[in-house]
Each structure stands twice: as structure tokens, then as C-alpha cells.
């Protein structure tokens, strides 16, 4: 049950996030390399945030609460908010140095193209790190959430 909830939330948030990202990259005329790197990082963030929401929802259930608005103010809801902010800040700090290298390159000449080509490996490594960190966080939280769900079942 926990894996199914995670799969649906990760799929839905990733689809929405990638759609907005690709439309934005197209409208801002960002290069294909930057769009791919941002998409990889966005998938990692989507998976991590989905795992945080589903994982903490399983770890800190509040069956006595009837309204979804009450659940947000609970300990699990507050912890989810704080951890989500930390995850977004961490992923932004991982990817933003790469974006600073590419953004001023629109029409800057052939020398900037050589710099961009040489920084592609670094950017791909940063995106891999960001995406890999999201997947690793998702795996750990889903493992903990599945163990907690087994304890709740009778």
C-alpha cells in the first residue's frame, strides 16, 4: 500500500513538474543541455518530496483527525513541511552553480560555447548527484515507512 501511494504521488508530481519545466525552458530558450540537467534534478526533487510526504504520513498517522486541515498542523505535517523545505534548499544549492555557468551563454560567442562544452561534465555530475540524492532519500524513507506500516497492521 505504501509503495502504491508513493508511485502515484511520484508519478503525478513528476509529470506536472516536467511539463512546467519543459514549457518554461522552451519559452526562455534555454539550451537542450540545461533543460536535460534541470529535468534530471527536478525528477530527483519530485521523488524526494513524494517520499517525504508518504513516508512521514505513514510514520506519524493521526486516525483521530477527520479533516485534512487538522493533519497539516500535527507533528507529522509540520515535520513534513520542514523536511520538504530542507530538501528543496539542498537540491537548489546542488544545481544552482551549474545554472550560473550556463545562463549568461546566450549569444556570448564561440569561446563561451567551448566553456559550456567543458562544463557539461560538471553539470551532468551535479544533476546526477541531485537526482541520486533524491532517489536515495526516497528509498530510505520508503523502507522506514513500509516497516512502520507493518507495525500498524493487525
Image: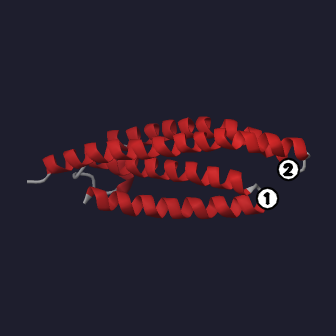
Q: Is residue 74 left or right of residue 108?
A: left
**Are the residues flagged by discs 1 and 2 in contact, CB closer than 8 Å?**
yes
Q: Which mark is residue 106?
A: 2
Any part of residue 83 in sight? yes
Sooner in the amino-acid sequence: mark 1 or mark 2: 1
- The image quadrant of residue 28 is bottom right
Where does the image place residue 48, in percent across and percent down from the top left? 44, 47
Where does the image place residue 75, in percent across and percent down from the top left? 33, 39
Q: Is residue 117 left or right of residue 140?
A: right
The residue located at (50%, 35%) in the rendering is: 86
Where does the image place residue 121, in percent across and percent down from the top left? 65, 41
Please tell me which residue lies in front, 35 or 154: 35
Quadrant occupied by the C terminus: bottom left
Please tell me which residue lies in front, 81 or 43: 43
The residue located at (51%, 59%) in the rendering is: 14
**Could you tell me how far apart the alpha carbons at marks 1 and 2 are, in whole angstroms?**
9 Å
Colour scheme = secondary structure
Where does the image place residue 21, in percent across and percent down from the top left? 64, 58
The residue located at (44%, 63%) in the rendering is: 11
Q: Is residue 55 left or right of residue 151?
A: right
Please tell me which residue lies in front, 57 or 7: 7
Any part of residue 74 in sight? no
Near mark 2 (Cα within 10 A), the count class, few <14, some 14-19 or many ≥20, is few
The residue located at (80%, 39%) in the rendering is: 115
Task: Identify the residue under disc 1.
Answer: 29
Amino acid at each position: 500500500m505504501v509503495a502504491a501511494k508513493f508511485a502515484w504521488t511520484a508519478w503525478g508530481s513528476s509529470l506536472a513538474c516536467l511539463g512546467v519545466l519543459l514549457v518554461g525552458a522552451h519559452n526562455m530558450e534555454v539550451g537542450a543541455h540545461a533543460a536535460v540537467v534541470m529535468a534530471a534534478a527536478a525528477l530527483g526533487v519530485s521523488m524526494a518530496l513524494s517520499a517525504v510526504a508518504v513516508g512521514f504520513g505513514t510514520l506519524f498517522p493521526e486516525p483521530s483527525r477527520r479533516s485534512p486541515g487538522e493533519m497539516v498542523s500535527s507533528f507529522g505535517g509540520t515535520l513534513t513541511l520542514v523536511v520538504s523545505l530542507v530538501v528543496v534548499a539542498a537540491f537548489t544549492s546542488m544545481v544552482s552553480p551549474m545554472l550560473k555557468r550556463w545562463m549568461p551563454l546566450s549569444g556570448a560567442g564561440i569561446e563561451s560555447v567551448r566553456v559550456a562544452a567543458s562544463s557539461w561534465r560538471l553539470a551532468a555530475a551535479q544533476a546526477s548527484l541531485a537526482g541520486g540524492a533524491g532517489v536515495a532519500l526516497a528509498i530510505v524513507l520508503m523502507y522506514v515507512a513500509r516497516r512502520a506500516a507493518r507495525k500498524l497492521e493487525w
